[in-house]
Image (spheres, grey):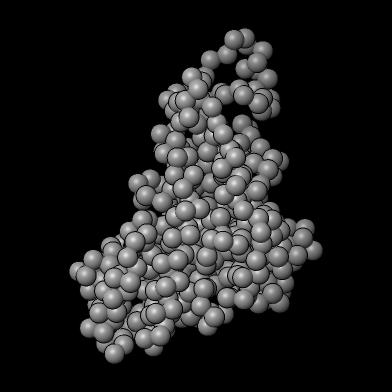
Amino acid sequence: MHHYDPSIEIQDYLVFGEYGDVNPSITDSSTYTFLNPQTMNELFEHEIEGCFLYSRHWNPTNKYLADALARLEDSEAAIVTASGMAAISCAIVQLCNSGDEIVSSRTIYGGTYAFFKNFLPKFGITVKFVNTQDLNAVKKAITKKTKVIYCEAVSNPLLEIADIPKLSQVANNHDIKLMVDNTFSPIMISPIRLGAHIVVHSLTKYINGTSDCVAGCVCSTHEFISQLTDINSGASMLLGPVLDSYRAASIMKNIHSLHIRIKKHSENAQYLAEHIEKLGCKVFYPGLKSHSGHKLLKEIMNDGFGFGGMLAIDAGTTEKANQLMAKMQIEKVGYLAVSLGYFKTLFSSPGHSTSSEIPEDERKAMGLSEGLVRISIGLDNDIKKTYERIKKCLIEVGLCK
């Protein structure tokens, strides 16, 4: 485990509002005035600290949040976007041109998979999907055209753990970038400290934590973030995935409780995973010794935040999975809904929802069962009662005795 504590970086981030307000005023403006034409002309040529041009480029409220996220990920800089997919797509198109290639983990979020497989080829960008747990497979897939290795720190939905230090070494040996989606493991894992060059998030999930907005971010070097926001060639500037400043202010407040929430999510998930596994069910949770990535995660994780709030149960068949989810909602375990990181428990069947974009044969190849139920564990105060409710559902469906 690492002793780096990102929560201290957030704790020490003090932003004083224009009137001394502890919650800085929300900048509700699309454009900004200049005291002289020369400054405006100069800003079109290069970024000037403290000067704002147009909110598609930068907004003060969004800049506060971006700076906080850079602290969270220990990156030099960051930019916020209107969704996690916007963050991924902007970063990718900034890095890749027609004719370039990407080597991607095969176990990734279905939306990312669809973007890579169905959308990028329209622009001449090829993506090779490999088992990134196998470093030799990654190395074999790299060619002179490869620009990026892409993976998720904790994969969706199988919860595989990426060996970021080793993938970084491979990337550096080939002078390419390692991009890591850290949506499932904010504050738990610090990919940039482990060697990643770019980190992306769906802020919609754990970082915001209240399922009331859609947002994303890219964390990287000053150089790369400046490239993304460049007025003439920046993907985020020209494609325009602008996060609303009111939403940025809301996420900014929620990020200060992230460390408390992640600890509770992890504590509850650990309890449920251990007890459900004892019932004889097939459980995927990196906090279990039976999980293939348990040892690796212990080596790369930040100490004190647990193993995360996501677990999965293999119900065997689609029918059993559907029965289990329906019963859990009736028993008030939580909601049958996609997404994660909410204060209530959410569950879905990835093969028929968030991973449905992946062809069935490829889902089988990666080990994604038709009966897999992905569960985002909530902040329940009485987790023993939650367990008893889940146990009742498992018994009624016939998954345990």
Q: Answer above or below: position of 339 versus 59.
A: below
In the current view of this chain or complex, which residue is farthest to the top? 36
For the point 64% across and 41% down, the residue is 77
Q: Answer above or below: position of 366 versus 35.
A: below
* Residue 344 left/right relative to 330: right
| Nearer-the-camera pick, 189 or 58 | 189
The quarter of the picture where the N terminus appears is bottom right
Residue 346: x %, y % from top left: 34, 63
The quarter of the picture where the C terminus appears is bottom left
Q: How many numbered circles does the render carry?
A: 0
Q: Answer above or below: position of 76 versus 372.
A: above
Q: Is residue 120 visible?
A: no
* Residue 386 left/right relative to 257: left
Picture quadrant where residue 47 is located: top right
For the point 38% across and 68% down, the residue is 375
Q: Answer above or below: position of 24 versus 378.
A: above
Residue 234: x %, y % from top left: 61, 38
* Residue 266 left/right relative to 378: right
For the point 55% across and 31% down, the residue is 15
Residue 43: x %, y % from top left: 65, 22
Q: Is residue 192 visible?
A: yes
Picture quadrant where residue 35 is located: top right
Residue 252: x %, y % from top left: 47, 40
